[in-house]
Amino acid sequence: MITSKIISNGILRALATILIVAIVLYFLYEIQTVIVYLCISLILCLIANPLVKFLRTKLKFSNSMAASTTIILFVLMMVGFILLFVPLIISQANNLSLLDTNHLQQQFTETERSLETYFNIQHVDLNKMLKDSKVTSMLDFSYFTSFFNSILSFMADMGMGLVSVFFITFFFIKDQEIFKDQARRILPDNNEDKILNSVTKINHLLTRYFVGLLLQLMVVFILYLIVLIIFGNKNAFVIAFLCAILNVIPYIGPIIGTTLAGILTMISLIGHDFQSEILPTTLYVIIGFLVVQAIDNNISQPIISSKSVNSHPLEIFLVILISGITFGIVGMIIAIPVFTMIKVILKEFFPNNKIVSVLTERI
């Protein structure tokens, strides 16, 4: 028989559960930066696993030496990545300093008139539109100070974040076996094997995924570099490298990279004739980048991604699309790793479920 006391106790338990969940969620929200550091460190650890295994087995490095060597390589790669942009910035600054604004405006006006004549478009006076709209009177120049302060704050946070990530990554690499032993002691005995099997498979598949991703970026980088060299871009290596990195963002990254390559190509050609050199070369570079993206989207990306995580290319496309619509760019980046983890866990804990067996038959 249900009494008022039982009902009240049930309500109190429910309220207590809700309160505990709310406190936990609030706590996770407050330490979200630490969680991000842990996730980045875990990804770096997965990427470094093949190298660490090589150092330990082939070169007989100790755990500490292998971890230290790996972190040093990561730091050198990061420093090299930053130094790559110094020549690019200096070169673009020199090109901008040579800019003849009067000549450029004259060329732009001539091009605009040619396009209007060709497409039979009514002339639009942009200068008059800007004056009538009084845009300059609405500008608040105090935003520039706030923007500068934001940049300084971002750089300070970035420095602290990098130190924290590398520190955590060092111990993730060095003490992997210790963490596994401690996890075995904590895990419930009835599900210990399933959880450990899930972790092992996830570790294996995600390592393959991130290594495959690096291979894909290398292929895209080489193709971008070939396109830029063909059309005589002086900063071909740096631009190709930056645009290849942007390919980490599925679908949107290549668009940003192509736009950036076009802008940097135009800036690098400042001083040349706009109609006969700047515009055609920029269009050729953009077309070349679009061809590279077509090759990447239809050949290298589906093959590498699907083979590394044992998923069908259409399955990967749908997961990325849904994650992008739901969680934006961040969702698109983490879609495949998270989906792979979910599949592995479902297969371990619900192997007899028909839907799960169909989704995980490749794993």
Image (cartoon, rainbow, N blue to C red):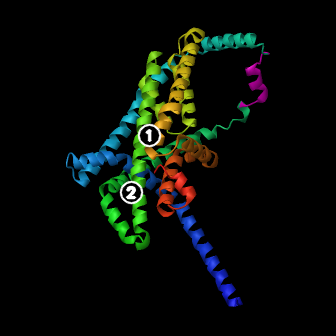
**152 to the left or right of 179:** right
Determine the secondary structure under disc 1.
helix
Q: Residue at x 50, y 37 (%)?
A: 302
Q: Quadrant of residue 282?
A: top right
Left or right: 108, with 164 as reference point: right
The dot on residue 213 is 1
Residue 85 visible (yes or no)? no
Three-letter code for the amino acid on which mark 2 is drawn: Thr
Mark 1 is on which residue type? Answer: Leu
Q: Position of residue 115 (x, y in %)?
A: 71, 13
Residue under pointer 2? 200
The stretch drawn in magenta includes residue 336: no
The N terminus - image quarter: bottom right
Q: 65 or 351, which lies in front?
A: 351
Tell me residue 335's x, y (percent). 54, 48
Q: Magenta span has 124?
A: yes
- Is residue 141 visible from the viewing direction of this image? yes
Mark 1 or 2, which is nearer the eye? 2
Find the magenta span and give its range. Answer: 122-135
Q: How many marks on residues?
A: 2
Q: Residue at x 40, y 73 (%)?
A: 189
User: Within the image, what quadrant is residue 64 found in?
Assistant: bottom left
10 Å crowding of disc 1: few (<14), some (14-19), many (20+): some
Query: Which residue is located at x 41 percent, y 38 percent?
Result: 214
Neighbor class of circle 2 (other Cα within 10 Å; few <14, some 14-19, many 20+) is: few
Q: Which structural element holds mark 2?
A: helix
* Left or right of 348 on screen, residue 74: left
